[in-house]
Amino acid sequence: MEKPKLRHRVLIVEDEDNIALALDYVLTREGYAHERVANGADAMPRIRDSAPDLVLLDVMLPEVSGYEICQTVRMDPALKDVKILMMTARGSAMERRKGLALGADGFIAKPFELKELREEVRRLLDGDGAGGNA
Amino acid sequence: MATGPGAMLNRLGLRLRVFLFFAALALGSLSAIAAGLWLGYGQAADGDLLSGFVTAGLIGGFITLGIAAWVWFLFDEHVARATERLAASLRAEAHAGLDGRTDTDLARYLGDLAPAARAISGRLSETRDALAEAVQRETTRLAEEKARLETLLSDVPVGVLLCSGDHQLVFYNGPATELLGAAQVPGLDRPIFDYLRDAPLRHAHERLWSAGDAEAVSDLLVATVAGARMLSGRMRLLDGDGAGYVLTLRDVTDDLAAHAGRDRLLEEIFDKIRRPAANLLTVIGVLDEAPDDPALTGALVGEVGQLAKTVTELGQRYDQARAGWWPLPMTRGADLLDGLRARMEAQGLQVTTEGDDLILRCDGFEIVALLAGLAERVAGKGLTRDFNVRLAEDGAGAVIDIGWRGAAVPVGTLDGWLDAPFDVGAADVTGKTVLAIHATECWPQMRDGMAILRLPIREARRAARRPQAVARRVVYDFDLLFKARAEGLAETALEDLTYVVFDTETTGLLPSDGDEIVQIAGIRIVNGRKVQGEVFDTLVNPGRPIPPRSTDVHGISDAMVADAPPIEEAGRQFHKFAEGAVLIAHNAPFDMAFLRRHEAGIGKAFDNPILDTVLLSAVVYGQGESHSLDSLTARLCITIPEEVRHTALGDTEATADAFLKLLPMLKGRGVRTFGDVLTEVRRHGRLLKDLNA
């Protein structure tokens, strides 16, 4: 498997430890630099500090929702290059529309296949693939 | 001044004229005998005595016969036929109310009889006019009240039916027509069981009847006969001994389907989750003792995977289905925007609205309350007091945007607003409740430099594509509540029968040569009255070209029938319309020949009793008159507007009106029952075949 030419930095915003563990595994295998925060309140300071290339953002978070974080990122011009891939266990068409309307670059429903996640991450970071979920 | 022998005769008295007739007959006979004897005597003088007598007898006999025939002709023309015509004319005046129609010229040789008859009819006419004028005033007042009540009843949004004690339809409104099924147009005096399954109605009726409480009501659930709809109903008995009842109906098919769908999904959730959950617990229990067993780990992974997949699939189905679980009406977008604008302005906000002309599936009141509440909170946050509300089509649905120039609302703030109760007239209703009922979300975003709050509506359509409006007319005849029913058709009084008067237009006159029907029209007559609103009128695709000469007559062209149903379908619909009724047509053998040759394709036999207005006219006016539809309607003072003459419905109307005027005239002749009329018309079999074989 070809590794990314640049070490893209990914921030995982996920309160479920098991999902975070799985994401950690996949991103490590793919060669991305990554870190994790476990609640919405800590997410924005970390995003502002590190300006990651991609945020894997859960929708249902304690304290501050994923939608709110997404909107805040998109309203900050300094973070305009940050890509956001939202994750939700519900994934109804209306939630997907809401996420994309708030500025998410992709939307993926849990449970997801690892292959699906890899392709979506690559599409957003490297411009690979046929397109997103919009 | 008339001159000549005819005019001179007219001046003589009737008795003197009759005397002169018979004197002339006697003198003529004597002269004939004398002439015969004179000629016979001439031959006898030549020695041929036998030949003389024969000649005398033949000449005398033939001349007498000729004189008798001449006198018979004069009596038949001027006495018998004139009496018949005068009598028919008087009957028409007396029974059908045809004022001023007694023609004295018909009976000019009957002396003073015709002027006397005219005088009587004149007095009758004056009395009738005076009475009619008085009745008219009162009728106008009652008609206005009746029209108001009909409007009120027709605007009731639920189906309302009134049935007699023997379950015959006496009243129905427009929504009831819709509920009972578009394929089966309801008809007065038809059994309600033609449309609704009988058991729930009979049970409810028996419950109320046995309870003996005038105030009691019985709720019921009943399916349409075709099973396509489930209706929730309430039955209440009418006052009086007839045990008639009022039935109000509401379509709950979608409600029940939603309930059933929810139950099925719930059942499926437990069914599909219980098994893998139990398996998981079992595997986990064994794993405690053998944590490194790869087979057990595999089993665990398999069960977890299966459980996750099932939950995801059920969750998606829940999301798709929940929008249909709450009954939402179709709401006009313009009304919703207007209501929202009024409410926002009442809150002191400036608002402009714009949008497509859409019909939305939503609870307009809740949506207006939600959006107005959100706007109020936006204003309260100091973001703006000047809003623009836009409604736009969005795929199969629509979006409502509340926009303003200024900063966007943070999602977290919006979520907080949506979690708080809203003033929608019910306790504990939050914005999120309203969103859940409509299976939608609400979010902030930017559009054309404006901050907006967007609310998608899942189902909408263009207002121009609205379905055909529900017929709002009420149809009723309360006399049917007290109608006595005879045992057999022959014994049934003519005015108690239900009739369907009909007419067809065709490609030509010869069904045996392939001519076909291009139009059928029918009108129901119940209790001696045309039922307004129960009209059958359809074009029929004849499956062959319509000759131009036929189009010239009825105005129906090939293009007009291109999309019309074939006779098999139109005939089936007409059969249903005419079910249980006596068919009436003018020259019925013609129309029936066209229908009966398609009975196999239609799948129904037209075995209704049949009356023919040609034969009824012959019964009333005698065979000597013309019985064409034009002649009959002219005699009965019925005007057929030229534009509808030779259209099926126009001729049907004229035939129905003629029949209704012939009914009292038949009754005046002692023809009261269907059996009586059959006996009478069969006397005129030479004129036209009676089809009630």
Image: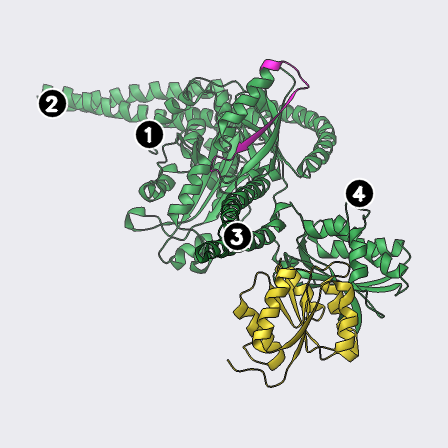
Viewer-proximal residue among A73 and B688: A73
List the residue tagged with mark 1.
B685
Nearest to viewer (mark 4 / mark 2): 4
Query: Dot 4: few (<14), some (14–19), or many (≥20) neighbours within 10 Å?
Result: few
- Name the mark nearer the viewer: 4 or 1: 4
In whole angstroms, how far apart are the C-alphas of marks 3 and 2? 130 Å
Q: Which mark is residue B519?
A: none
Residue topped by disc 2: B51
Do discs 3 and 4 belong to a common subunit?
yes
Tell me: residue B53, above or below residue B173: above
* Chain assignment, label 1: B
Label 1 or label 2, whichever lies nearer to me, is: 1
Task: Determine which residue is flagged by label 3.
Answer: B307
Q: Which residue is mark 4?
A: B425
Q: Is residue A35 above or below residue B528?
A: below
Q: Is residue B366 left or right of residue B206?
A: right
Q: Quadrant of the N terminus of chain B?
A: top right
Q: Which residues are magenta?
A: B210-227
Element under disc 3: helix
